[in-house]
């Protein structure tokens, strides 16, 4: 009524009231009545603003990629931005009189795109796809030093790059290459595993052969030891046999000497007996046989005398007509024990 109006702002809105071109009041969360025909209101939001962006850029190897991210910023100096951009409210006080507030996000995004493009043009495709963290740090540093944003009194609260994607054709080519690389690594792993298995098998075979060689060596040593023991036993036996033979030879030599001595003695004894017999025969050469027989019977036993009598009877049997021998005499002769 009559141009008098009331306005109330939130604590996150900095309001500046100009009356006839002069700053009348300013602050956050103000509420007051004003006269519309002579008043200009400037409302600057102080809350943080999020802006999403999508860029299509080219890498150092001329490959097109799509970068998607988000930036968060806020106005820290309302006076600076009010001097450069139009944040005036329309006469109704419900909206802005220009589109500068809507263009502020695009200004920030444009600055981000310039910084991102400068970095991506230094990187090949593969490095660019993995450079989100590097881009965030580099672009955030660049935004804090960007003159256009500093002059507007803006503060960058956060920057994040959500995705960096190549074109579908390039993605398929990279996937195929990566798949081939994975298959190659899988083949290399299979080869390495088989090679390891072969090496282990060879090591096992070598260990088995070494074990067999060691066993055979031990067997040979045992056999050599046994042969040495057998040789020592055989040498001992040969030594004992040689000693036995030497003893036998010595004994036979002594026996030979004994036989020679016995033969010599027997010969001498026979010569002595022959000489005695010859001398005896010469002594009895002229003596009657009856006398010799009588001398021979001297000292005989009764049975010997009876035997001599029977011999004489037998020699003169042709001269004897009848001879009677009593049974008692025969029994006595048969039962008589021979003289020892």
Image (cartoon, grey):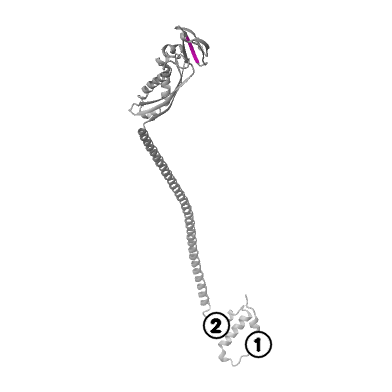
Query: Does the residue at mark 1 contact the one at mark 2 (Cβ under 8 Å)?
Result: no
Q: What element carries label 1?
A: helix
Left or right, residue 34 beside residue 326: left
Note whether residue 131 is visible. no
Q: Say if the magenta span includes residue 325.
A: no
Q: Which of 167 and 259 is in front in this view?
A: 167
Secondary structure state at the residue bearing disc 2: helix
Q: Where is residue 263 in the image (x, y as percent from the top left)?
A: 49, 67
**Cα distance in 3D space between marks 1 and 2:** 33 Å
In the displayed structure, would residue 117 be above or below residue 6?
below
Say few, some or many: other residues with alpha carbon within 10 Å of mark 1 (under 14 / 14 to 19 / 20 or more).
few
**Residue range of the region highlighted in magenta in the rendering:** 13-17
Judged from this view, the residue extending furthest toward the right is 328
Residue position for label 2: 289
Please report the residue visible at 59 percent of the width from the left and 85 percent of the height from the top: 310
Magenta span dominant secondary structure: strand
Nearer the observer, 328 or 41? 41
Identify the residue position indicated by label 1 in the image.
327
Q: Earlier in the sequence, mark 1 or mark 2?
A: 2
């Amino acid at each position: 009524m009559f141009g008098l109006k009331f306005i109330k702002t939130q604590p996150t809105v900095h309001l500046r009231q100009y009356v006839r071109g002069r700053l009348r009041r300013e602050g956050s969360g103000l509420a007051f009545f004003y006269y519309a025909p002579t008043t200009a209101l400037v409302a600057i939001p102080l809350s943080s603003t999020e802006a999403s962006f999508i860029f299509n850029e080219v890498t150092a190897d001329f490959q097109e990629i799509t970068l998607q991210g988000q930036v968060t910023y806020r106005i820290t100096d309302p006076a600076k931005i009010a001097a450069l951009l139009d944040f005036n409210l329309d006469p109704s006080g419900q909206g802005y009189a220009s589109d500068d507030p809507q263009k502020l996000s695009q200004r920030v995004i444009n600055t981000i795109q310039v910084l991102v493009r400068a970095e991506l043009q230094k990187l090949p495709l593969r490095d660019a796809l993995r450079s989100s963290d590097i881009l965030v740090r580099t672009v955030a540093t660049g935004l804090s030093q960007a003159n256009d944003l500093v002059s507007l009194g803006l503060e960058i609260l956060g920057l994040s790059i959500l995705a960096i994607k190549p074109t579908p054709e390039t993605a398929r080519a990279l996937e195929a290459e990566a798949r081939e690389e994975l298959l190659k690594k899988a083949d290399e792993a299979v080869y390495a595993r088989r090679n390891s298995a072969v090496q282990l098998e060879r090591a096992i075979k070598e260990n088995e052969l070494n074990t067999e060689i060691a066993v055979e060596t031990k067997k040979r040593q045992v056999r050599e030891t046994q042969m040495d023991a057998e040789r020592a036993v055989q040498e001992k036996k040969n030594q004992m046999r040689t000693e036995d033979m030497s003893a036998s030879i010595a004994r036979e030599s002594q026996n030979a000497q004994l036989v020679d001595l016995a033969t010599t003695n027997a010969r001498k004894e026979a010569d002595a007996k022959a000489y005695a017999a010859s001398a005896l025969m010469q002594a009895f050469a002229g003596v009657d046989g009856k006398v010799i027989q009588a001398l021979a019977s001297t000292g005989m036993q009764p049975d010997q005398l009876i035997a001599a009598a029977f011999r004489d009877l037998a020699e003169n049997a042709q001269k004897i007509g009848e001879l009677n021998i009593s049974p008692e005499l025969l029994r006595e002769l048969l039962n008589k024990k021979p003289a020892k």
